[in-house]
Image (cartoon, rainbow, N blue to C red):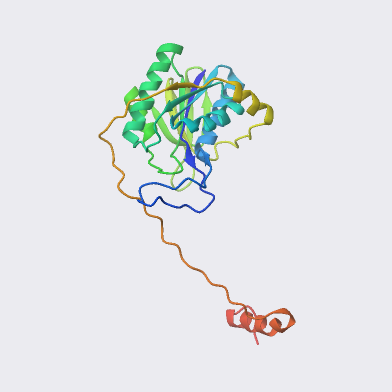
Amino acid sequence: MNILVCVKRVPATGGRIQLTDDGTDIDTRHLGFTVSPHEECAVEEAVRIVEARGGSNAVLTLGPAAADEQLRDAMAIGIERAILLETDGRDWDPVATASAITEAIRAQEAANGPFDLILFGNESADSGGFQVGIRVARALRRPIVTGAKGLDVRDDGVTARREAPGGGWESFDLPLPAIVSVKEGINLPRYPSVPGRLRARKKEIERSTPAWQSGGLEKILLRLPQTEATAAEVIGRGPDAAPAVVDLLVKLGVLGR
């Protein structure tokens, strides 16, 4: 079983997001970077499949030179090879991204044999376009299931399960080679160990420079969502606050007079 996982370097969104002065990008000077939770699960799934069935796996990303950090994180938990499609750091739209990934997959398969299974995260944590995996599948003429939260791999195919609207599950049987985009919850990703990180730092990363393809969506401006201001009222301090607390509870209907 030969598996490829495609991931994207995105800003860690635990902190407060700020935009650049021109409003066209996220100011990342004080942010770390990671991959989306869906893609963390895709990496974990690729490692588990090879551990259970044998074979090989690889991880691929399109991004700046610094994206090798996310590739090494994947190798630290068991991915064997890493491929960086190195860009100049500008934001690539889904059309250009899918085109570059498709060409890279074709080149990899010509050199190393076909991928039986290609995994994507269901959507990236920053733009959330839901497009790249589907565009790659169409270009490669391979079946795809999106939103998978369960995978059973066989020698001749894969069964992908996803949650159905209103409850229950939908199951899809796909012949190999196939493409699946997975959602967070399909598994519990492991953390990279210290020995794993040390091994990953010694591994070579395959690098190439993809050609930009125009004709996709053009980003004009980013806007931050409006935030609601909240206020707190100090109703008293120390023992003197007890009557005020009682009055407040009565007002809220928790206590009765």
Give the farthest residue toward the right: 239
Name the spot of residue 7 as percent of width and height, x first: 47, 32
Judge left or right: residue 234 versus residue 61: right
Query: Residue at the location (65% across, 87% down)?
Result: 257
- How many numbered marks are there? 0
Judge left or right: residue 108 versus residue 46: left
Name the spot of residue 25 as percent of width and height, x first: 39, 46
Query: Residue at the location (53% across, 33% down)?
Result: 70
Give the farthest residue toward the bottom: 257
Name the spot of residue 133 as percent of width and height, x first: 39, 32
Does any portion of residue 144 appear in the rendered image? yes
Give the vertical position of 233 relative to 121 (above or below).
below
Query: Residue at the location (40% across, 50% down)?
Result: 20
Viewer-closest of 119 and 254: 119
Viewer-closest of 104 and 165: 104
Judge left or right: residue 48 versus residue 87: right
Which of the 4 quarters of the picture holds residue 225? Answer: bottom left
Give the vertical position of 123 relative to 158 (above or below).
below
Judge left or right: residue 241 versus residue 42: right
Does any portion of residue 137 appear in the rendered image? no
Name the spot of residue 71 as percent of width and height, x first: 53, 29
